Image (cartoon, helix red, strand yellow):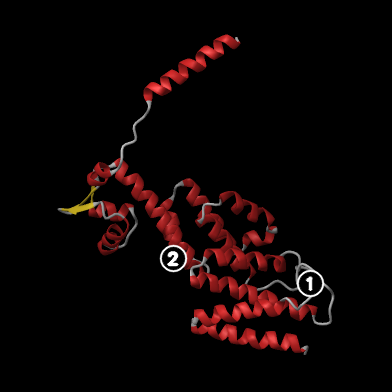
Amino acid sequence: MDPKLTEVSQYFERFKAACVREDIDTSANLLSQLKVLLTSFRSLPPLFEVTPNAVQELTIARDIYEHAVLLSVKMGDQDAFERDFFQLKPYYTDARKRLPRSPQEHMILGLNLLRLLVQNRIAEFHTELELLPAESLEDPCIKHAVELEQSFMEGAYNRVLTAKQTVPNQSYDYFMDLLAKTVRDEIAGCSEKAYDFLSTNDARQMLLFSSDNELLKYINEEHPEWEIKDGSVIFQKAKETAPCKEIPSLQLINQTLSYARELERIV
C-alpha cells in the first residue's frame, strides 16, 4: 500500500476510536490532521486525477468526511456541519460513477435536510430535494425529513414534536431537539397573545409536554415572565411587560392623502 494512504488509514483508525470514546477534543484534532493529509491525494475533488490508488483514496476520504459530519452533530456545531457536508457532497455527486454508494449517504443527506429545516432555509431544503434521484426519495431518512417539512408548513406542530419518537437514526436527535424548541417557542408565543391564562394541564397539552415538571422547567428557562398560580399559567404579566409600539396614524393618513393627490395629477 502507498505510504501516504497507510498513514491516512492509521490516523483514521485513531480518529474513529476517539469518536467512539466521545473524546471530542482528540477527535477534532485528529480530523484537522486528516484533512491536511488528504490534500496530498490528487485523485480527490476537484482534480479527480486517475491514480493507481484512486478508488481507495476516494473511499477513505469520503469515510473521513462522513465521520466529520457526524462529529459536528455530537459537538452541536452547525457551522462545522455545513462546512463538512459541502466537502463531502462531491463524493455523493461527482464521484458517484467512481465509487459504490455509501451506506451512510441517505442518513447524512437526511440530516442535512433536517438542518435546513431547523434553520428555516426552506428554499434550500427544496433545492437539495430536487437534486436527489427518484430512488433516494423513498429512503426512510429522506422521507422522514420531507414529512417533517410538510407537517411544519401545515402548522401540524403535534406531528413535528411526536416525530422524534420515530427518528431513523440516533444522530437525528440533536436537530429534532432544536426543531422541537422552535415549535414550542412558536406555540408559546401564540398562546400568550391568545389567552390571559391557561390551566397547567391545558398548557402542558398545548406545548406537548408529557409531565408538569417538563412544563415547569420550560417556563423557568424560557418564559420566566409567565406566572404560575393556583394551578394556572398566567400570561397577563407578560402582556403588561411587553412594550407597546405607537402607530404613527397621523403620518400614515398624510402620506395616503399625498399619494392620492399625486395619482389625481397623473390621471
At x 50%, y 79%, the residue is: 24
Query: How far across and how far down the image is residue 199, in percent?
Result: 22, 51
What's the residue at 31%, 42% (across, down)?
Answer: 193
Counting from the top left corner in percent of width and height, residue 257 is at: 46, 15
Furthest residue in direction left, as rendered = 230
Vertical position of residue 232 compared to residue 92: above or below? above
- In the rendered image, the vertical position of residue 257 relative to residue 194, given as above or below: above
Q: Quick one: 98 or 14, which is closer to the camera?
A: 14
Marked residue nearer the N-terminal end (2 or 1):
1
Callout 2: helix, strand or loop?
Answer: helix
- Please give the label number shown on residue 98: 1
How packed is label 2: few (under 14 Cα within 10 Å), some, or many (20 or more)? few
Residue 106's place in the image compared with 154, above or below, is below
Kind of residue at disc 2: Gln
Q: Amino acid at mark 1?
A: Arg
Figure quadrant of the N terminus:
bottom right
The percent coordinates of residue 60 (x first, y second) are 69, 79
Does residue 170 appear in this view? no
* Residue for point 59% across, 74% down: 68
At a point 58% along the width and 83% down the height, the residue shown is 16
Mark identifier at residue 165 = 2
Residue 219 disc label: none
- Asked if 243 appears above or below 131 in the picture, the reply is above
Secondary structure of residue under mark 1: loop
Q: State which quadrant residue 214 falls in.
A: bottom left
Q: Residues within 10 Å of mark 1 (few under 14, many from 20)?
A: few
Q: How far apart are labels 2 and 1 at the CA level?
A: 37 Å
Q: How many marks?
A: 2
Residue 225, position in %: x, y?
26, 51
* Residue 105 in sight here: yes
